[in-house]
Amino acid sequence: MEFSHVSVMLPEVLEALQPERGGVFVDCTAGGGGHSAKIAERLPAGSRLICLDQDDEALEACRGRLAEFGDRVTLVKANFRNLDAALDLCGADRIDGALWDLGVSSHQLDDGERGFSYAKDAPLDMRMDQAASLTARDVVNTYSEAELQRIIRDWGEERFAGRIAARICRVREEAPIETTGQLAAVIAEAIPQAARQKEAQNPARRTFQAIRIEVNGELDAIEPSLRATAERMNPGGRMAVITFHSLEDRAVKDVFRALSTGCTCPPEFPVCVCGGKPVLKLLTRKPLTPGTEELAFNPRSRSAKLRTAEKL
């Protein structure tokens, strides 16, 4: 299917990154190239944009969308956790701006065959990188009940994680759970009817989120990527991160706080003895959220939060 993804909080991202300053910018989650195209349009002569993504379909769409910018734009298949290696490959020692648009894309959700959505019955997959070995089917059918409970509780923040994990294990004893529709039905059976009736959204969404995060190692990649970027960023460089659920936002907030504080000495110490110095200045003490106009034309942006910081 044609790759489509609405760029979330685009004006706010451009205001934060200020690509017109020039230099080397990185879109760590290029997707279909929506944010990338607008950044590239604003880059002055002699500047460069490096676009990373682990999804081959996204890179192909990005390649077509950014063709007009020629060698000003470089595309690399890479997970943003491997930012250092990607920059080395491109010969980019220092950078001046970086963007992360975390989570699953609209295209990945809407393409039923990718197995991300409980709304369309498809083989359990959920891999952002189709070359990766671990699939959602593997997680659902081979993880122990304790492991399933842990990821559904921790990554999905699901209060019925124990019941869901137990139900999955009972059902798969008869036959493997193969499709998103089967999994969604198993989850619904595990959640008490009264709780299901109170749900404004599908009760499977938190468990699907948890399994997707596990398959792609999404949360594990955030801290090393942010820290590597801060290390390679020139003074005055800007970082902008869009998150879509509380776990992502908490991870970004914690790293930004640590990098903007520097000193790790206990509060009761009269003077600093660790020697830590802040390397970032927070530009957003509280995250920005989409405005009413954006929410009207793109309801999927409702949970988006944007945090930004500047290299000291």
Image (spheres, helix red, strand yellow):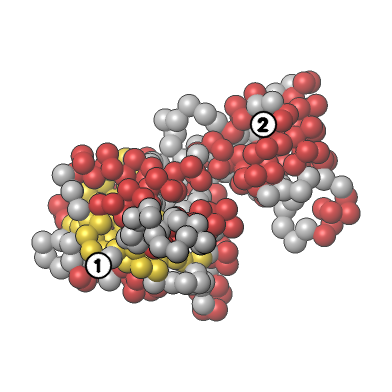
Vertical arrangement, residue 300 with respect to residue 169, above or below: below
Residue 48, image x, y percentages:
18, 57
Vertical arrangement, residue 70 with respect to residue 208, above or below: below
Residue 279, image x, y percentages:
32, 60
- Numbered marks: total: 2
- Quick one: SS at disc 1? strand
> Looking at the image, which is closer to me, 263 or 78?
263
> Looking at the image, which is closer to me, 311 or 10?
311
The residue at 35%/61% (across/down) is: 278
Numbered tag placed on residue 236 in the rendering: 1
Q: Is residue 125 left or right of residue 175?
A: left
Q: Residue furthest bottom?
A: 292
Residue 123, image x, y percentages:
60, 33
Q: Is residue 56 left or right of residue 210?
A: left
Q: Nearer the viewer, mark 1 or mark 2?
A: 1
Numbered tag placed on residue 100 in the rendering: none
Where does label 2 land, which residue? Answer: 147
- How much space separates mark 1 and mark 2, taking CA atoms? 43 Å
> Looking at the image, which is closer to me, 53 or 97?
97
Question: Quadrant of the image for the C terminus?
Answer: bottom left
Amino acid at circle 2: Glu
The residue at 72%/48% (across/down) is: 158
Q: Earlier in the sequence, mark 1 or mark 2?
A: 2
> Looking at the image, which is closer to me, 293 or 237?
237
Q: Is residue 13 visible?
A: no
Amino acid at circle 1: Gly
Mark 2 residue crowding within 10 angstroms, few (<14) / some (14–19) / many (20+): few
- Quick one: SS at disc 2? helix
The residue at 25%/52% (across/down) is: 232
The residue at 76%/27% (across/down) is: 169
